[in-house]
Amino acid sequence: MSGRFIVGNTVALMSATGVAAAALWPVYQTGAFVLLVAVAALLGCGIAIVGAVFRWPAWLVGLTTIGGYLLVGVPLAVPGRALYGVLPSPAGLAELVPATALGWKQLVTIVLPVGSYQALLVPALILVLLSSVVGLSVALRSQAAELALPAPVLLLLAGIALGPVQATAPTLLGLALFTVLVLWLLWLNLERRRGRLLVSATAARPPVADRRMGAARSVVVAALALTMAVLAGTVAAVALPPTAARDVLRTRVAAPFDARAYPSPLSGFRNYLQPDLADTVLFEVEGLPAGGRIRLATLDDYDGVVYSVGSADAAASRPDSGTFTRLPYRLDQSAVRGDKVSLTVSIREYDGVWVPGVGALERIEFIGSTAAARQESFVYNDLGGTAAIVTGLEQGDSYTSTAVVPALAGDLADALPGSAVLPQVDVLPDGLEKTLAGILRPGDTPGQRLQAVLDFLATTGYVSHGTAGEPVSRSGHGVDRIDELLEDQPMLGDAEQYAVTAALMARQIGFPARVVVGFVPAAEGDTAPVTGADASAWIEVQTQADGWVALDPNPPVREIPARQPDDATPISRPQTVLPPPAPDAAEQSEPSQPESQTVDPPDAADPFWAAIRLVVTIAAWSILGVGLLTAPFVGIVLAKWRRRRRRRLAHRPIDRIVGGWREFADSVTDHGLAIAPQATRTELARSVGGVRALWLAGEVDRAVFAPDGAAEIDPDGIWVSVRELQNSMRAGLNRRDRLRAVISVRSFGRYAKRTAGRDGRRRRRLWGAGESTKGPGQ
């Protein structure tokens, strides 16, 4: 094993490992990860080299790898616990060892990127270190160094599996890794040829045409494979959307928090308004902007009985519902337009799993003796903006959060529905469509329709919590309660009913909408107490221009008129419009789907051209598929054609004569005839049988060994005999066997047979050397 061979494989493996490890960058996105990959790859290659040079057994290499892992694991994977930044500490080892087994699940149940949070760099360290040790050990120790190639490939697949659901650049990484591996294979092939030439230095040198052909063949095959891979990758990159969701581990591992296991915050809305909690300070906030709303939970899943927080099951089919994951150290909210707010919350009498907050959370830091426990059990749904503590908040807890509060919505009249996909609503109140038919006007824009719904609720509804001294107003927000709200004269309810009604109506118009439960503090100042009376609910709708915007559907508190008798003549409600003619009314009464009722469908394509495009598309993909499948066989045929052409057009007559014999011998090999490794030309001809083969062997021997033999023999005649012999071999075969001989690669291996005996000891000293350049019968 030469130093050249060690250095070459080390450089190749480290290059492949670096490319493959880039698949993990979306998971970490920190400089600590780059340092980890560099050091782990160097350490792994060092262990593999020492083990190969000193012929260590596998168990000793394994123990050394474990020792190196424990030595560098804390500084690289748990940098916050390292002594002086470079030495392992007992506390760091106490985190490193459990993370070896537990870090994998933690990594796929947390919001990305994780940075260097806790010990989540441990899985990356294990993958890179093992890939380097195993890959280079196989490359240096095995006679088939190509067996080391799966190591970086597996590292790339692991990075994709642990990565985000939204693909970043897997196609480009795959092509880059493929390119490195092809170059590695090409270098290995060249090293083998170099070793064979060193071993067979005393043997007869083959003709120049054959030597050039062998070197060029490797280049042609590698270039052809690389070209086809780049072509296939380019087509895949164009055909597949770059942001398509992938089925990765984090979509398969159960989330650490299931919102369905807890009652909906909206179900207990009226508990805050009862006398015992209405004046009780639940928590205090510092830093809340004027008019700010404090979110408790976002509800986007309605089953006709209760509006609840979207669950992990709902998010599997409705990605905009979101799931709860652990928060590492920060979230990137640069895409949210708004003002950054720092909010400090001190818990008083509030208790529950839902964490009060504002806007889109960037980071949160708990304060006090319970800070570590609260941080550990904190989970966050970034799409819904809802936070929770699995163990629940208690009196005395305190935290400071940094968030971006979205800007206020523009004019609703110009708003268009967004594209968010929320859990489907299968059960609607019976009176919802009838009420919408009386509110909406034909020709209005989606934004005008949404504004009409809000105006209707604000002017027609009245607020009553059903407490002492107020008219009876039943709690709940099931379809029966919403029907009761719409039929009552006057409409009586509170934020629980009005928010649900507004959200359902907005969704029927075409806007993605959800309900938000929270608090709107009446007090102002640097530190504002929040009481139960501040509880409220509102809606958020998604528009194309502003994203999710908060809208208040609640009517103002005002004197409630006397209830109308049930048999009285119905009185027209303010802001209602008479239904349009029957056909338009029927059209308005149909449930609107997002965007489908507000955007004109595109003009139908010409059926003829549509059929032509379909045929061309199918034909193009079929040709590409056939091309990819047949490319290896086409490459074999081209390589044989080039080999035959070089032999026949060689400059010296002797080279053309010997080349003709080698073409015949290659044909014999491709047709499956077994030939002894050191058979002479005459022995090979006897194996084939026939007088013409023996005559050809004798003529070639005379040309090679007689003083002026080459001058007396016509090279073209030799090639004519070769062609006739090839035709005679094919004559007795069926079509399948003839095709098998055409695409056979056995003849390429004739020059890779090992020389027996005389160069044995030298062959063992040179890696890959030992294949004689003199084939059988040459």
Image (cartoon, rainbow, N blue to C red):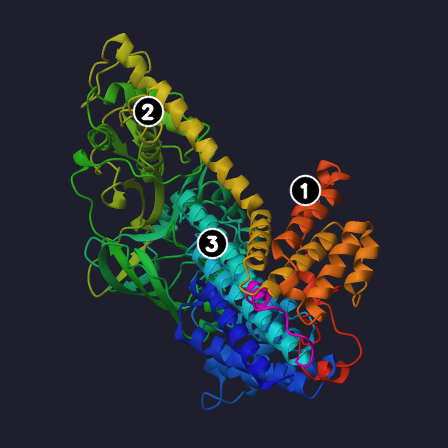
Of pointers 2 and 3, the one earlier in the residue sequence: 3
Q: Does the magenta segment cover residue 14? A: no
Mark nearer the viewer, 1 or 3 = 1
Of pointers 1 and 3, the one earlier in the residue sequence: 3
Mark nearer the viewer, 2 or 1 = 1
The residue labelled by disc 2 is: 486
Q: Nearer the viewer, residue 665 or 713?
A: 713
Left or right of residue 616: residue 735: right
The disc placed on residue 722 is: none
Q: Quadrant of the C terminus?
A: bottom right
> Bounds of the magenta span?
201-214
Residue 189: image quadrant is bottom right
The disc placed on residue 739 is: 1
Disc 1 versus disc 3: distance between alpha carbons? 25 Å
Residue 666: image quadrant is bottom right
Classify 10 Å Cα crowding around label 2: few (below 14), some (14-19), many (20 and above). many
* Amino acid type, residue under disc 2 in the picture: Leu
Q: Quadrant of the N terminus?
A: bottom right
Classify 10 Å Cα crowding around label 1: few (below 14), some (14-19), many (20 and above). few
Residue 461, x across and y down, in percent = 25, 30
On screen, residue 268 above or below 45: above
Left or right of residue 34: residue 191: right
* Amino acid type, residue under disc 1 in the picture: Leu
Q: Nearer the viewer, residue 553 or 659?
A: 659
